[in-house]
Amino acid sequence: MIVEFLMVAVGLLILIFAGDALVKGAVNLALRLGIPALVVSLTVVAFGTSAPELLVSVQAILDGAPGLALGNVVGSNTANVLLVLGIPAIIATMHVAGCDTRRDFLYMLAATLLFIGFSLTGNLVWWHGVILLIVLAGILLATFFSSRAEDIEVEGAEPGLPGWKITAYLILGLIGLPLGANLLVEGATLIAREFGVSETVIGLTLVAIGTSLPELATTVMAALRRHADVALGNVIGSNLFNLLGIIGVAVLIGPIPVETSFLKSDLWVMLAATMLLVPFVFFGRDITRTWGVALTGLYLSYLVWALT
């Protein structure tokens, strides 16, 4: 079992560093080619930061473990709200009164309800993916036209970065992502078989936590720097892309059967976690240490329940 867990750990590390390298390379290449900063932020950065989850989901389907892909997305969305917001709030209270994330939250809620509706059919197929990607494109366009007057700071942008470094980042990202995804999926599948649980459960827990680590690191730093808008926006944006972009692409590769346990509990846990954001988004309630302990406690309880 040590080898399998080592495969998962190494795969996660490669995914994190390769994803970061791909974002840096792609962002600086796009800016050098004269693409507007807002377009780069909405497309290259958004898709690039979700590349690890996307590669894991695609690899899982190719390896005949579609439940792992579905568990990864649903588990990540639950972890993003409860864990990724909970732990930073324990470290430092996040003051969200000045953050206007209502529109983005409504987009995420609509995406969640659409995804649940499709899942209730019992099998996610290619035309579900087409609709999800069309909705994502529509949201990106709406965001572009409503935000184009704003001054955008692009994540990963390094003015004056030499061309050879851009090339190196791109190569490292493009080679590292599939390598890391392959190691992670293979290790997770072997662990699931060893413990006698489904790939879906491993996706909901081990893989979901692992692929949420970059979001957790970003949110912790945002909380320490008193940038609550970055923390909340990071979680909402990540969840939106998971549901529309990652599942949208994944089901174009192959169908994803939805297990009965998902329909009975996990989808509704994800929806309930989403609704817990309402007091912060619409009423400006601070995410205090008490909230942080409560959110983290809820996630740990869910984790124990899912594994047992």
Image: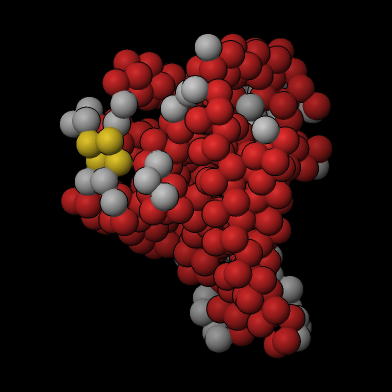
Examine the rendered structure and indicate whether residue 133 appears above or below residue 215: below
Residue at 31 percent of width and 26 percent of height: 259
Q: Image check: 226 left or right of 307?
A: right
Q: In the depicted view, which residue is nearer to us: 279 or 246?
A: 246
Q: Quadrant of residue 105?
A: top left
Residue at 30 percent of width and 41 percent of height: 256
Q: In the depicted view, which residue is nearer to us: 136 or 192?
A: 192
Q: How many marks?
A: 0
- Quarter occupied by the N terminus: top right
Examine the rendered structure and indicate whether residue 259 appears above or below residue 124: above
Q: Image check: 224 left or right of 258?
A: right
Please state the horizontal and vertical placement of residue 171, each as a whole percent of the image: 63, 76
Residue at 61 percent of width and 84 percent of height: 32
Residue 104 can be seen in this image: no
Please state the horizontal and vertical placement of residue 187, each as a whole percent of the image: 59, 42
Residue 10 can be seen in this image: yes
Q: In the depicted view, which residue is nearer to us: 290 or 20?
A: 20
Examine the rendered structure and indicate whether residue 170 appears above or below residue 156: below
Q: In the depicted view, which residue is nearer to us: 160 or 9?
A: 9
Please state the horizontal and vertical placement of residue 260, each as a whole percent of the image: 29, 21
Q: How is the image coloured?
A: secondary structure
Please state the horizontal and vertical placement of residue 176, each as a whole percent of the image: 63, 64
Residue at 45 percent of width and 53 percent of height: 59
